[in-house]
Image (cartoon, grey):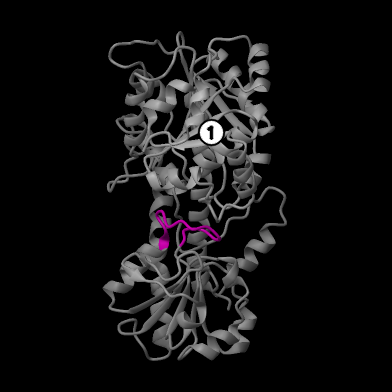
Amino acid sequence: MPLVEKNLTNMNQEIKNIFPSDINQIQEWLKSGDVRVCVVGIGRIGLPTALSFAHAGLPTIGIDINANLVHMVNSGNYPLKDEPGFDKIFEEVIKNKKLKATTEISEAVPQCNLILLSLPTPMDKNNVPDYSAIVSVGKSLSSLIRKGSIVVVESTIEPGFVENELTSILEGSDKRLKAGQDFSIATCPETANPGEILSDFKKLPRLVGGINERTAKIVSKIYGHVFGVEIIEMPDCKTANAAKLTANVFRDINIAFINELAILFENLGIDILKVLEACDKKYNFETHYPGAGVGGPCLPVNSYQILNSARGMENNGMLRIIRAARETNESMPYHVVELLADALNDIGKSVKDSTITLLGISYKPNVKDIQLAPAEAIIKRLDQLQAKIKIYDPYFKDSTVFSHKTETNLDDALTNSDAVVIVTAHNEFRTIEPSLFVAKMKIPVVIDSRGIINSHAAKKAGLVFRGIGRGGV
């Protein structure tokens, strides 16, 4: 699909060399809109990023291989319905023609002097980070970027990837342009939480690292202009990426710690929610909660990115805590099924041939996203045990997910079920009264993997109830 809108060709006017330039000059160009932006990858983070730059008055082109997504943007159809706040910004920048989209990277990049990479960095089947999207785009950019341009990597990558691999990829085999001399490279790892991106963009500091100090200062000036938040200049790209990964791996490890305690407390007859409520009163305790597992494109991947950074090092015992945390969190879907089997056993049933309703398949509440969702492992295990599965998720109604057809409404999902497993704490599920389970289900067996059911209300209603870490219920 070509650039579609001919009015983008007005961007072919003189394009400023933003690297290297005087910092004060950059400020003037930001005011006049002479910093022209490409965002490569306009998905969950990339599109809000493009909208933010366009909203700041900078002409912006979004590039994506998804032709349907590109068509939606150019047609004024906001794609991220579960990302509140950006819909109004989207309408404004489309109306003002500050944002266009294309699938043609070769047409867009030469028109811009700031190229942002917001590309996926998933894991392969062996839990090794997959940077193929960045590598592929980098090879294309090597013949397209203009002298004086800056490439900023927003994707989450492991420390050293820019220095050890991406720089030479962008320079290309012919070394047409030299990094740090003719163009430059920086990282500004995204830190936004899906479902809350606009709020996070407005309040969370941004980390900026460059391949040299001048680059870091220029990119910091640009991001400060666009986002209006604290900009933290890091010594280099690898340090910026290390900080991003450290923050997320910290969460992965602490969730694993709480998950291990949850299983212990189940056996000791202790409700972990009461424990955490008390611990939260201590000034230096940061509360994490147990659950069916840790999903999404960030935390699980980030831990494996850190682990991958240690490859080849002599001490094979390094990073034992991170490895153990991954093992614990990846085991939690199976623990959920064990709780289910135990509850069914109490009423003389087995998982086999029982009708099990899963509530929620997104990896986190209130977003339409199933990347590395714990629900997938739960479903696979239930399939192995020959259960009959029903699924309801308000973001995946009447569709096929993980090889199963989903229900269109909550009532149908609950009717005549033997057991319910709450997998995702969507807002809709937080308001369910225990009496609804009693009214709709055969025998109200409820497994709460997210701590949203009040234990006293569950007991009073007569539910056969289990929850992760809810040993005192």
Q: Is residue 181 left or right of residue 223?
A: left
Residue at 47 percent of width and 40 percent of height: 42
> Which of the 4 image quadrants contains residue 103?
top left
> Which of the 4 image quadrants contains residue 307?
top left
Q: Is residue 105 left or right of residue 238?
A: left
Front-lying residue, 387 or 225: 225
Binning the other alpha carbons within 10 Å of mark 1 as few (below 14), some (14 to 19) or many (20 upward) gives some
Q: Residue 277's x, y, as percent?
A: 67, 63
Q: Residue 171's x, y, as percent?
A: 36, 16
- Amino acid type of the residue tagged 1 in the rendering: Ala
Front-lying residue, 430 or 114: 114
Callout count: 1
> Could one spot residue 249 in this view of the protein?
no
Q: Residue 215's x, y, as percent?
A: 54, 16
Quadrant in which the C terminus is drawn: bottom right
Q: Which residue is mark 1?
A: 243
Q: In the image, which residues are magenta? A: 362-374
Residue at 58 percent of width and 33 percent of height: 98
> Could one spot residue 241 in this view of the protein?
yes
Front-lying residue, 192 or 397: 397
Quadrant in which the N terminus is drawn: top left
Q: What secondary structure is the magenta-colored segment mainly?
A: loop
Magenta stretch: residue 260 in it?
no
